[in-house]
Amino acid sequence: MSNVEHYDAVVLGSGEAGKFLAWHLAAAGKRTAVVERKLVGGACPNVACLPSKNIIHSAKVASYMLRSEEFGIVTGPWGIDMKAVRERKRRMVEGLREMHLANFAKSGAEIVMGSGRFVGERTLEVDLLSGGTRVLRGGQVFLDTGTRAAIGKTPGLAEAAPLTHVEALELDSVPRHLLILGGGYVGLEFAQAMRRLGSLVTVIEHHPRLVAAEDPDVSEAIEQLFADEGIDVSLNTNVWSVSGKSGGEVRLNATQGDSKIVLDGSHLLVATGRVPNTDGIGLDLAGIATRPDGYIHVNERLETTAPGVWAMGDCAGSPHFTHISFDDFRVVRENLAGRHRVTSGRQVPFCLFTDPELARVGLNESEAGRQGIEYRMVKVPMASVLRTRTLSETRGFLKALVGAHDDRILGFTAFGVSAGEMLPAVQLAMAAGMPYTALRDTVLTHPTVNEGFLPLFSAVPAVAPRNPAPTLKAGGAV
């Protein structure tokens, strides 16, 4: 093949793992090229994590305006200007883009803007956005192509031109009535934000409860939150056809249990999952195998089936969180340096950015039960954390699982104000094998939300006997 350009490393995709690896390799003197088809820095700073949290915060401010009298604030007439909300988000994104470009320039990594596909072993042909093509061959190749919103095959769904999270972040007016397919992270965060910005909102979920992977008390708490904020939730609902156009009039024909129902709205947002961006990039020509679901097959070192090729982040089937993609970068970086680091057994914390937040690390009761792990459960209301009273944000609870016969922390769940900020302390204790008493006995600043560890871990029941009493079962609480 003529006109092949040789690089020490070629990275396909500039998402979290890809960009950090490119910066690292280029700064170390490796000739490095990053192929990016559209968004420098990947989805997180452009159309996902950070922009969505920007919109969510605007909605939070709107919620405070609605509660102003509660805080002794007298306001006059006010309203929502979605164009201004969008512009604030755009300003942030532009600042992040400039930051990424500066990091690429500083590192020496070359950005090649275009769509890349494999045409041979460790060789990519790039259709440049500016026109023409380039062929790049890497001594090592790293894939970080991410995922995209899944649009199901329900009749009429694609024809309705539904919003995904990408288009929802660009709305310049408040939807009259937003229908949301899916009660996962994206669906729930947008549901609350859009309701607070003035839209009628209906969430349609096929499971019998929201966040079905969490414990029932978590589902109940979120469902009550949504009910209190005027968000309609249609559970155990399966949509079998869609008609109309999102942005005008859209209708969902569905079944709820044994009943047929019709849901009408002005806009439709699809948030039913993700599919990997692995199709059409010539993986088979490079000897890179994929799983039946389309994700790239990797081992615990993130090596693909092709020598000298790694995959990282969402496209490798890693948990779909930016912080996990960053850890994928660290796994690959350490192994390239001759060390041994794997993805198996690592902590996978998460935070759902509703208001209040839901945060968890480690096991919940449902998972412990399925795995036959005995535990002691302790749970306290957020109102027992005095900081929440100063904020008038007492909704929620803290919950922990502790080993039935030792003092290890098995899992922690928080549903409350600043819940995500509580995770690092628990993660550190779990990673270090520290007993729960280490957090219980720490002198914590008053009044902070983290002070909630004191009432929580002070309430842990006594250690269960080695021969458990009848009330203690595998996966059961004392």
Image (tube, rainbow, N blue to C red):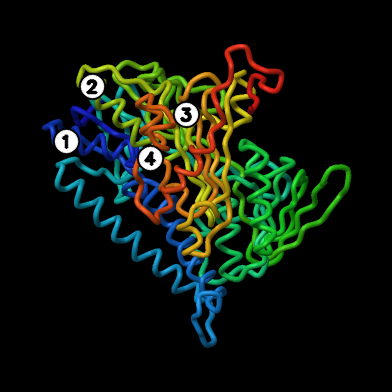
Q: Nearer the viewer, residue 112 or 318?
A: 318
Closer to the observer: label 4 or label 3? 3
Relative side of 36 to 220, left or right: left
- Quadrant, the N terminus: top left
The residues bearing labels 1 and 4 have C-alpha atoms spaced at a distance of: 31 Å
Quadrant for residue 296, please give it. top left
The residues bearing labels 3 and 2 have C-alpha atoms spaced at a distance of: 33 Å
Question: Which residue is drawn at the image coordinates 16% and 48% (left, top)?
Answer: 105
Q: Residues within 10 Å of mark 2 (few under 14, many from 20)?
A: few
Closer to the observer: label 1 or label 4? 4
- Amino acid type shown at disc 1: Ala
The residues bearing labels 3 and 1 have C-alpha atoms spaced at a distance of: 40 Å
Mark number displayed over residue 26: 1
Circle 4 sits on which residue? Answer: 424
Circle 2 sits on which residue? Answer: 336
Q: Are marks 2 and 1 in contact (CB under 8 Å)?
A: no
Residue reaching furthest bottom? 76
Circle 3 sits on which residue? Answer: 409
On screen, 43 above or below 9?
below
